[in-house]
Amino acid sequence: MSGTRGGRVAVVSDIHGVLPALEAVLAEPEVAAAARVVVTGDIAAGPQPNEVLEVLTGLGDRAVLIGGNADRELVELRKGLISEVPGDPVATWAAGRLTAEHVALLAGLPRTRRLSVAGLGDVLFCHATPRDDEEVVLVDSRLARWAEVLAGLDDDVRTVVCGHTHMPFVRLAHGRQIVNPGSVGMPYGRPGAHWALLGPGVELRVTHFDTEAAAARLGAESGYPDIAEWAEYFLNARAGDAEALAIFGPRDGRKGPNGA
């Protein structure tokens, strides 16, 4: 377990290689002043993979990077273990552009980190759940489902921070506080770069930035062939939260529309 040097912790997740969105969050005064910036996975699978990794590694030991399923898939693509990520062509493109150093960085990322945060005690950070980097839990997941994914955690971990589903929420499950900061680069439900501030409580934040200018910048700098369409859709959060919940719902084990 590592401490946070007594300061607050900014949490960002699911950057997906969108440098303008990441830069907007890092420019927030409370993020700039945070003792740690924890990144809960899916860092580089997007239009500016190397650029995002360079900015994060430039933060030095302030940055705590955790691997997500998309980061693992980039490594698998580069190693020839898989040939594509179904439904995510930008991932294949991004994998081909990563430097060897960045591939090694992603390959070595931990799947969880545990930090002590003032006011919250021991906090476990992960991408999807503490036990898996791609299973789904949602704000309205059943308590029985939360019991499954939280099984085995030490009793003194009272807060769990995850990402993966690109929608921010805070809820209680079996006495533990669950926090999802939402997505920096591919938000579902509403535009903006979503993040969280921890210590002594939990605050969900959103940083609004000029998405039109960001899309133009991606078009000029990325090189991804379908960048205009990709940026228009994801930077403007064309995927609604209701649509996302309907797609994700069956993956959290529910059988019916009411989560039964």
Image (cartoon, helix red, strand yellow):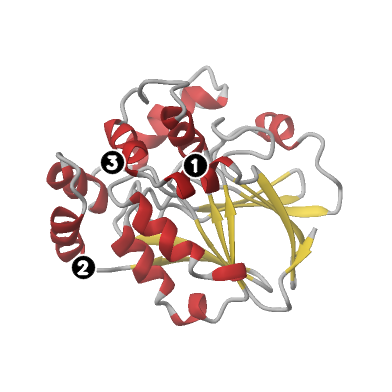
Residue at figure coordinates x 35%, y 23% from the top left: 84
Residue 230 in view, yes or no: yes
Q: Secondary structure at mark 3?
A: loop
Do the residues under discs 3 and 1 have CB atoms within 8 angstroms?
A: no
Q: Position of residue 242 (x, y in %)?
A: 35, 38
Identify residue for label 3: 239
Identify residue for label 2: 210
Spatial CA distance of label 3 from label 1 is 15 Å
* Res. 11 image quadrant: bottom right
Identify residue for label 1: 164
| Amino acid at pointer 3 | Ala
Q: Position of residue 136 (x, y in %)?
A: 54, 32
Q: Secondary structure at mark 2?
A: loop
User: How many C-alpha atoms fall within 10 Å of the one at disc 2: few (<14), some, or many (≥20)?
Assistant: few
User: How many C-alpha atoms fall within 10 Å of the one at disc 3: few (<14), some, or many (≥20)?
Assistant: some
Determine which of the numbered discs, if any, sits on residue 218 in the image. none
User: Which quadrant would the C terminus be assigned to in this image?
Assistant: top right
| Amino acid at pointer 1 | His
Left or right of 51: which side holds 158? right
Q: In the depicted view, which residue is nearer to us: 186 or 170?
A: 186
Q: In the depicted view, which residue is nearer to us: 119 or 75?
A: 75
**Which mark is first along the chain, 1 or 3?**
1
Q: Position of residue 89 (x, y in %)?
A: 28, 31
